[in-house]
Amino acid sequence: MRISVIIPVYNEQDTVSETIRRVRSSPVDKEIIVVDDASSDETAAIVAGLVGADLKLVRQTRNQGKGAAIRRGLLEATGDIVLIQDADLEYDPADYPALIAPIVAGKAAVVYGTRAPRFRGMRWPHRLFNRIAALLASLLYRAHITDEATCYKVFRAEVLRDIPLKCERFEFCPEVTAKVRKRGIEILEVPISYQARSIGAGKKIRWWDGVIALWMLIKYRFTD
């Protein structure tokens, strides 16, 4: 089964090249779709220099957010499996074989890579949010997951395409979690490695994004 790796990226000139190198090194059959969300630095130029048979660059004309970039990348995806990859080096593509194994084996249609229980290097406010989000998802949707906000979300392509996503920014995570569970699809978790980075090092999610994410989990319990 072929994987479509969607990499939404915004102003990651210091890490995007190494991210792509690591993704290319992962021993799975894949295509790489980088969606540049109107970066104001050299990110798009760096990716353009790496384009090849396995890598496509899509450029947004204006900055719209991570969720919008993922939705744009999904339009380009041709693989059997869709995997979301951040470009900040917090997540390791060496985990791809473990992440896709349950889908390839027919044991799952959706897999999340869980950073729990240690969330290595993560600041306590982010750890607290992650625990609250996982608890809320489990209470509202019987998700039984430990890491709702993880970047590593993997789907059978047809499952993700069947979900009417509306997300623009970081609310992709709660929206897709809610809508997957409301369709009765189980979410299987696989342990992954993780190395957090700080806001000073370029981390873009802020506290208000966490508040919005929790609200989205509540909102989508009662609407689609």
Image (cartoon, rainbow, N blue to C red):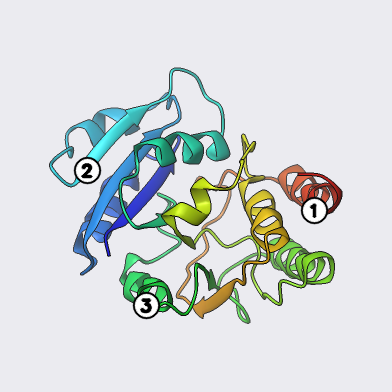
Q: Earlier in the sequence, mark 3 or mark 1?
A: 3
- Number of numbered discs present? 3
- Residue in view at x 56 percent, y 55 percent: 198
* Local secondary structure at mark 1: helix
Q: Is residue 201 visible?
A: no
Disc 2 to disc 3, C-alpha distance: 23 Å
Label 2–label 1 contact, CB within 8 A:
no
Mark 3 Cα shell of 10 Å, populated few (<14), some (14-19), many (≥20): some
- Residue in view at x 48 percent, y 67 percent: 195
* Local secondary structure at mark 2: strand
Choose between 162 and 171: the one closer to the eye. Answer: 162
- Tag of residue 101: 3
**Horizontal side of residue 201 vs 59, given as left or right:** right
Write down the quadrant of residue 28 in the picture. Answer: bottom left
**Residue type, label 1:** Leu
* Local secondary structure at mark 3: helix
- Tag of residue 55: 2
Judging by the rendered image, the residue that carries numbered circle 1 is 214
Q: Earlier in the sequence, mark 2 or mark 3?
A: 2
Q: Where in the figure is residue 107, as x and y percent of width and height?
A: 47, 80
**Residue type, label 3:** Ala
**Horizontal side of residue 75 vs 191, given as left or right:** left
Q: Where in the figure is residue 146, as x and y percent of width and height?
A: 67, 75
Mark 1 Cα shell of 10 Å, populated few (<14), some (14-19), many (≥20): many
Mark 2 Cα shell of 10 Å, populated few (<14), some (14-19), many (≥20): some
Q: Is residue 100 above or below residue 6?
A: below
Q: Earlier in the sequence, mark 2 or mark 1?
A: 2
Which residue, as the protein is rendered here, is positioned at the far left? 53
Choose between 78 and 132: the one closer to the eye. Answer: 78
**Residue type, label 2:** Leu
